[in-house]
Amino acid sequence: MSDIAGMKAELDGLVREQSERRALREQRGEEIKARSHEYMTKQVQAAERYVQHRREMAQRKTKSGWSTDRAATEPPSAFDSDPFGGEPGAASPFAPTPGSRPAARDEGPRRARPPRAAEAEDDFDNNPW
């Protein structure tokens, strides 16, 4: 009988420990939830302050007479014209004209450079470290 009583006491202790751990886990979960809610609330407040600041800046801009037309206030883009001042798509002053042809070469077809793969492999195979 004492074996049964001892086993029952041990089981009761395990059940109590399990319930205490469950309560502690739930408590920690609630704490984490509260902290994350507080963090998100602060983030929302910061975002609202930022939006309010941007609105105030926009109002100051219009009240002081600054232009609100972005196209007029932005500097010209590098893509608006080519490097020689012409419109996009205009020919470069160095481009050949339709009447001119490049000088013909007397050479035959170009020979390909010999492969240097063997040299590169030797460099890696003889690595001292």
Image (tube, grey):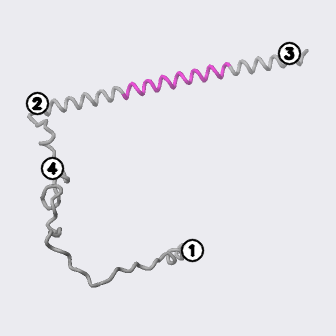
The magenta span reads 19-43
Q: CA distance from mark 2 to mark 1?
A: 73 Å
Q: Nearer the viewer, residue 60 or 17?
A: 60
Depth-wise, is mark 2 or mark 1 nearer the camera? 1
Marks 2 and 4, the one that precedes in the sequence: 2
Crowd rating for badge 2 (residues with CA inside 10 Å; few <14, some 14–19, many 20+): few
Give the side of residue 16 with respect to residue 60, left or right. right
Q: Give the residue pinned by disc 2.
A: 63
Element on which disc 1 rests = helix
* Gap in angstroms between the C-alphas marked 4 and 3: 90 Å
Give the crowd class for mark 4: few <14, some 14-19, many >=20 residues within 10 Å. Answer: few
Give amino acid for label 1.
Asp
C-alpha distance separating marks 3 and 1: 76 Å
Q: Secondary structure at mark 2?
A: helix
Q: Which marked residue is nearer to the observer: mark 2 or mark 3?
A: 2
Q: Which residue is mark 3?
A: 5
Residues at circles 4 and 1 in contact by the CB criterion of under 8 Å: no
Crowding at label 1, few (<14), some or many (≥20) Cα neighbours within 10 Å?
Answer: few
